[in-house]
Image (tube, grey):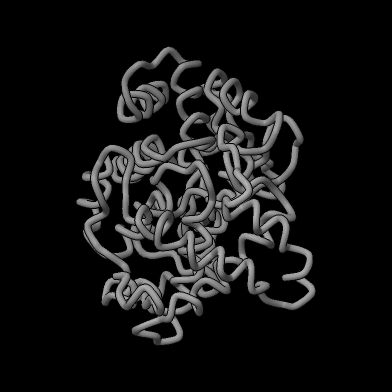
Amino acid sequence: MTVEFFREEPTARTSWRLAVLMGANVRTYKFALGEALLGAAAQGHGDILLKDLAGPYAMSLVEHLAQAPQASPRVTAAGADFLAVAREEAAESVQLGGPTEKLLAAAMKSMPAMVMRKFHHLRGDGEVPHRFYEVTGTAREVVVRVTPSLREVALSEQRPSLLAELAARWSIVEMSFAAGVGRSLVEEGVAVDLETLRITDQVRRRPVAGVTEAVIGFQHGRCVICGDPLIPGVDEIAVDHVFPYSFRRLMPVVDLDAIWNLAPAHRPCNARKSNRPPTPVQLTRLAMRNEAIMRSPHPLKRTLQLTLKRHGFRGGWWDFIQGVRDQLG
């Protein structure tokens, strides 16, 4: 499915989304690195000293550590583990407004050995088709060379969306690491607060991420209705019930307010569609989006799995969506 996802739109942006949205996560290092890379490349940097990348990387993790766990409960942090050092140095780093010497040194030591080796990796599927950096230089002074692919991503019109997707994914993975939440996610998945259009965990009932930010990357940042790009801050964006909410009286057993049926769209497209049933093209986009989510680890995937299971579907989203469509006659 990762191959199919790339084939739909074979660009550097899609490779970036594969790395951020579909890679395995036992720690959140990849998200901190992605954020730092986008920031550096957007400023026009070609060659970046590792220490200049390590600073924002370390501080992002310090900020997130104050809010949520940054590693799976299955990971045991030894004293020399970067997260252990980050916890120790967090208060002083926040006070300084930048990493302490000890934290910066720990980041510079761990990054090339761990996250920078794995950023391009996919679970069981090799690597993403584009590379976003090369590590060069010497042992004394490591240099991170920005590739044209990263520059293309960082300067693209979808950069705001890519940053929002990364932040949402980071929050969702943090939720899966939280004590007491993991079992609930396995048994129940996530819920959607329709008033705020935010995803919530079903144990703490806390908002985790916006629906748009959480799923838009799986539909290539495009409107589910017209297929054109959605640009946050430029376009007005709505969350479309692909099968309209008003249809619930015709199909009371199917939850039309769940993630599987919610997809970002241009607000004008959403208004024009109104309560009309989805077109075959829109259903295809929804099925492909949901199949892409199924290749992503952690809560969103589990939520969609549970939807299929509750309705007795052992096939994929094509069959399920066609079954729902058939109920309309």
Left or right, 301 with reference to 60 = left
Q: Residue furthest front?
A: 140
Residue plotted at (47% across, 30% down): 304
Q: Is residue 204 visible?
A: yes
Of 218 and 122, the residue lying toward us: 122
- Measured as percent of width and height from the top left, residue 110 is found at 48, 59
- Measured as percent of width and height from the top left, residue 165 is found at 50, 57
Q: Is residue 75 above or below residue 230?
A: above
Dividing the picture into quadrants, the one containing residue 200 is: top right
Quadrant into which the N terminus falls: top left
Counting labels gives 0
Q: Is residue 18 above or below residue 183?
A: below
Of 205 and 20, the residue lying toward us: 20
Dividing the picture into quadrants, the one containing residue 204 is: top right
Residue plotted at (50% across, 41% down): 26
- Measured as percent of width and height from the top left, residue 186 is found at 56, 24
Q: Is residue 156 visible?
A: no
Left or right, 179 with reference to 43 = right
Q: Residue furthest bottom?
A: 44
Residue plotted at (42% across, 49% down): 21
Of 107 and 147, the residue lying toward us: 107
Residue plotted at (45% across, 37% down): 297
Quadrant into which the C terminus falls: top left
Q: Is residue 321 above or below residue 66?
A: above
Of 193 and 178, the residue lying toward us: 178
